[in-house]
Amino acid sequence: MTFVRNEFSTIFHQDILFCKPLPSSTSGSEIFSMLDAFFIENSITWNNCIDVCTDGAKAMVGSVDGVVARIKKVSPNCTSSHCVLHRHSLATKKNSSVIKAST
């Protein structure tokens, strides 16, 4: 599932860009190939991609084969960030026993 956030008429919008199953694996190569095919099919240029937000999985952020590295090859000005909601989820897993004990 790929989400997109874009500005239109000075308002930011967020929506699902597309949702497709991966044909074989969740490797960086497979994920990037699916994204690239969607971009080509819909005449979207990679230069429109200015940031990629991921969960931090190796397939996404691997320095050579990760999706982010591949995107930065075709869109050099693109930046990347780690999803704040995923960070929150990881933090609350560690603290869940403390929080449960205090309630």
Image (tube, grey):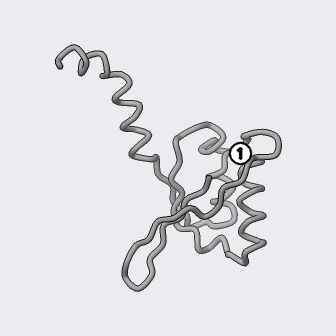
Q: Is residue 57 above or below residue 95?
A: below
Identified at 41% across, 31% down, the residue is 90
Element class at badge 1: helix
Identified at 63% across, 67% down, the residue is 75
Q: Which quadrant is home to the C terminus? A: top left
Task: Tell me residue 2's x, y (percent).
Answer: 60, 56
Q: Which residue is mark 1?
A: 28
- Circle 1: residue type: Gly
Q: Is residue 76 above or below residue 92?
A: below
Q: Nearer the viewer, residue 52 or 76?
A: 52
Q: Is residue 26 above or below residue 43?
A: above
Q: In the shown orientation, is residue 4 left or right of residue 101?
A: right
Q: Is residue 65 above or below residue 75?
A: above
Task: Tell me residue 18's x, y (percent).
Answer: 65, 61
- Number of callouts: 1
Identified at 68% across, 61% down, the residue is 73
In which quarter of the view is residue 101 placed? Answer: top left
Q: In the shown orientation, is residue 53 left or right of residue 58?
A: left
Task: Tell me residue 98's x, y (percent).
Answer: 25, 17
Task: Tell me residue 97's x, y (percent).
Answer: 30, 16
Identified at 40% across, 73% down, the residue is 12
Q: In the shown orientation, is residue 28 left or right of residue 3?
A: right
In which quarter of the view is residue 17 placed? Answer: bottom right
Q: Outermost residue, left direction?
A: 102
